[in-house]
Amino acid sequence: MSTVLAQIESQIAKLSSKAVRKNTGVITTVADGVAKIDGLSDVMYNEMVQFPGGAIGIALNLAEDEVGCVVLGDVSKLKQGDEVQTTGKLLSVPVGKGLLGRTVDALGNPVDGKGPIASTESYPVEKIAPGIMARKSVSQPLFTGIMAIDSMIPIGRGQRELIIGDRGTGKTTIAIDTIINQANINRVGLASGDPKFRPVYSIYVAIGQKNSNIVRTIAALEAAGALEFTCIVAAPAADNPANQYLAPYSGAAIGEWFMENGMDALIVYDDLSKHAVAYRQISLILKRPSGREAYPGDVFYLHSRLLERAARLDGKGSLTALPIIETLAGDVSAYIPTNVISITDGQIFLETDLFNQGIRPAVSVGLSVSRVGSAAQIKVTKQVGGKLKGELAQFRELAAFAQFGSDLDAKTKAQLDRGSRIVELFKQPAFSPIAIELQAVTIYALQKGYYDGIDLKKVTATSVSIREFFKARHDALLTEIRTKAALDKDIEAKIVAALDAWKSTQSA
Amino acid sequence: MPAVPAKIRAYAKQLLQLSLDNGVVSAERVAGVLEYLEKNPPARLSLVLAAYRKLVAAELAKGEARVEHAGPVAPEALAAIAAALGRRYGRPVAATATPNPALLAGLRVRIGDDVFESSVSGQLSALSAGA
């Protein structure tokens, strides 16, 4: 009993008897999540302000005689005449490994019912991106586990690669696959005890999404065992626009902690179109002048300052960003898509037509690029898949011509046949990323003609069978490919021998 | 609340400048300004007067420390508070005392937008916010 009292007394003793100075103001209007405040003469831009009843706000508009604040939290309890105080602090969120496996809101409060977050540090939500001197060029790969991407549009650690496409083309699936693949790689790498192994931790930021979708995503990550390496920042559609606006920055702050502390992290912003819409709403209510499509003038800076925070730091870690943008009717020349395309280091373009044809992931090889990733590609992928992009491009061209005539020479027929086999080979179901060594084997089999003569419809199943065979019987060889990351004559001979062994099981 | 047009705000600000004597609002000058406005009424006089009133009130609040207290406050303490705030803000400050039992004990001083909190209720609310 006495210890309890002593605790309370020590807490009381800690309260200094010195006068605390606070700058105050009075709410003049509250509307649509934005409060206009008279007073607050000392408030700073982006400073947190304290509303009565525990809600906090951020000062976004500093006018001569009025301060415009977005309210984070329950607006319904605020009324005209309420007193508002400055806090002298910028908005910050808890960071650290304690967030892995957790779901938090835009302010870093847990929303998954798993109790408080074990975190001692916090990072400011808004931070200037690392400068030129602190950076290092992208040279380490980040495998998505999707063959079409890893072989033709490779992504490196510290890169910003946009995933863009219409609704329902599998944008989120690619991001989730990538997160799952990182978890798979982490598990293998951590189990191997290799001191040089660098795990990749993931952050998934859901902006303006349906709660049911977020639940499904979490369930998919949990089922794949990826949740323990992942932090989810959720600002669903029902959340106020201020939280939706802040969520990506909170996620970036969580990712920066990993980067600053010598670790690698991957962040997915799903999606930035809805982020721009939330920011447009705030800006219009704050009466900022609107520009094209009613977006405010700083909508480019909104995304550029966010994506610039993804980097690979010299002597520290990296933060790789996969922003997602939803287009309307495949229009990549709309305002927000062009903005984000110009900021990022490449894009993965997903097409509705391909998706409906059953080519999933529906990656459009012609329109997708990776501007820095090829420097990060490992040698084995270059060796087996270096020509794939060109071959597929040729195939597309020929396929367009072949529709008009039936008389084709043998060479063209062969090229068409090969192209359609590559397309089949790259089909991959959702949430089943393929390890890079298995990808190498699959594509190597293509280069050596192991799929030739097989019915086109059976190519996908055959590739699965090859991978199963290698996983079951040639685990040591797969490990060798993974650790050496290049094909030499010895390994090639072993792969050929294994493929021949596989072939004999097929004909039997 | 409709926003005050920028022109009227600027005009009211000019009037405020005319009302200051050495940086302090003087009753004499305010009377002069009001007399002028009566003789030469500008367009939308009521808005101008409301804006002017608001500016003068804000200016006056900067020189007036409202001391809320629970329990007795000695006149010397009030004078000391006024002198300390005067030094801090670099202008003469007058202190007026109002009892506020809700503070439980201690003082709360308001001057302009600033609040100096040294009361038990303030500390308790800080404690509950931290918990």
Image (spheres, coloured by chain):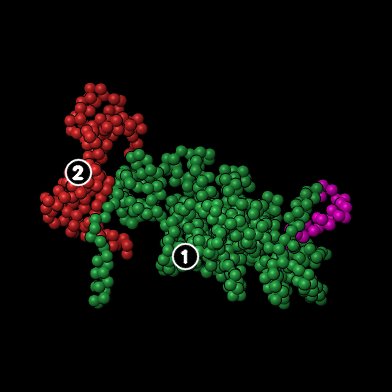
Residue A374 percent across, percent down from the top left: 67, 57
> Is residue B19 visible to the viewer in this orientation of the structure?
yes
Q: Is residue A425 magenta?
A: yes
Element assignment for label 1: loop
Span of residues in magenta: A402-426
Q: Residues within 10 Å of mark 1 (few under 14, many from 20)?
A: some
- Foreground residue, A232 or A158? A158
Which residue is drawn at the image coordinates 59% and 54% (left, top)?
A160
Chain letter, green in picture: A
- Mark 1 lies on residue: A96
Residue type of the residue flagged with mark 2: Val
Residue A324 on image: x %, y %: 57, 53
| Secondary structure state at the residue bearing disc 2 | loop
Q: Which chain letter matches label 1?
A: A
Q: Residue at x 48, y 67 (%)?
A: A97
**Three-letter code for the amino acid on which mark 1 is drawn:** Gly
Q: Nearer the viewer, residue B67 or A405?
A: B67
The residue positioned 26% from the left and 33% from the top of the image is: B16
Residue B20 position (above or below residue A373): above
Q: In the image, which is nearer the foreground, mark 2 or mark 1?
A: 2
Quarter containing the C terminus of chain A:
bottom right
